[in-house]
Amino acid sequence: MARTLDFTREEALALLGEYNKEEFHLRHALTLEGVMRYFAEKLGYAEEADFWAQTGLLHDLDFELYPDEHCVKVQEILQARGAGTDLIRAVVSHGYGLSGAEHAPEHEMEKVLFAVDELTGLIWACALMRPSKSVQDLELKSVKKKYKNPNFAAGCSREVIERGADMLGWELDRLIEDTIHAMRSCEN
């Protein structure tokens, strides 16, 4: 049975806009919305694709204004707006072990969000190095080459990406390649 949405997309976008003004954060939220929708459909959760997408859209809701309380403050914000426990838990769990988040990712959706959050940033950094500035022509081998250089996209934690792949039981190459395809599906 599909989980119900707590907000319409328009309401979720408005909420995101209340707490995020920087283009980078807004673009990241929209990327995660599309990536999570892609994975929901790919992994057999098509009936929950809207929920997965909304979780991706709102996952960093508190980060811009409350970076020191990331994944903590968002609980208050979402509860005050009437969000249900499924959405709150899913959003909070992506910060497990990284911030004050106390909920470990359990559902496959939560594990995907944990794994792809940092990875999408690294993939975008790789794409921006290309003449096309696009993920459309980005290949796994190019990302792997940059991935090995700890100074490239240094803010994207390889440890977190690898922990996410381990949580999912996936090889790192699979996670990277699938995430590239997910980002292609929503680049524009």
Image (spheres, helix red, strand yellow):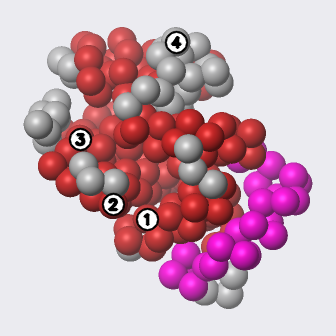
Q: Which amino acid does label 3 sit on?
A: Phe
Q: How far apart are marks 4 and 2 (CA)?
A: 28 Å
The amino acid marked with disc number 4 is Glu
Residue range highlighted in magenta: 134-157
The residue at which mark 2 appears reads as: 42
CA separation, marks 2 and 3?
Answer: 14 Å
Between label 2 and label 3, give the one nearer the viewer: 2
* Frontmost residue, 86 versus 162: 162
Residue type highlighted by circle 2? Lys
Magenta stretch: dominant secondary structure: loop
Q: Which residue shows up at 13% across the image and 39% down it?
A: 2
| Crowd around label 3: few <14 · some 14–19 · many ≥20 (10 Å) | many
Q: Distance between the residues labelled 1 and 2?
A: 9 Å
Q: Do the residues labelled 1 and 2 touch (CB within 8 Å)?
A: yes
Q: Residues within 10 Å of mark 1 (few under 14, many from 20)?
A: many
Where is residue 110, by image quadrant? top left
Going by the numbered disc 1, the residue's amino acid type is: Ala
For the C terminus, the image quarter is: bottom left
Residue that badge 1 annotates = 182
Front one among 13 and 3: 3
Q: Which residue lies furthest to the front in this view?
A: 169
Residue 71 shows in the view: no
Is residue 35 shown above or below 133? above
Q: Estimate the x, y position of residue 9 in percent, counting from the top left.
A: 19, 46
**Secondary element type, mark 1:** helix
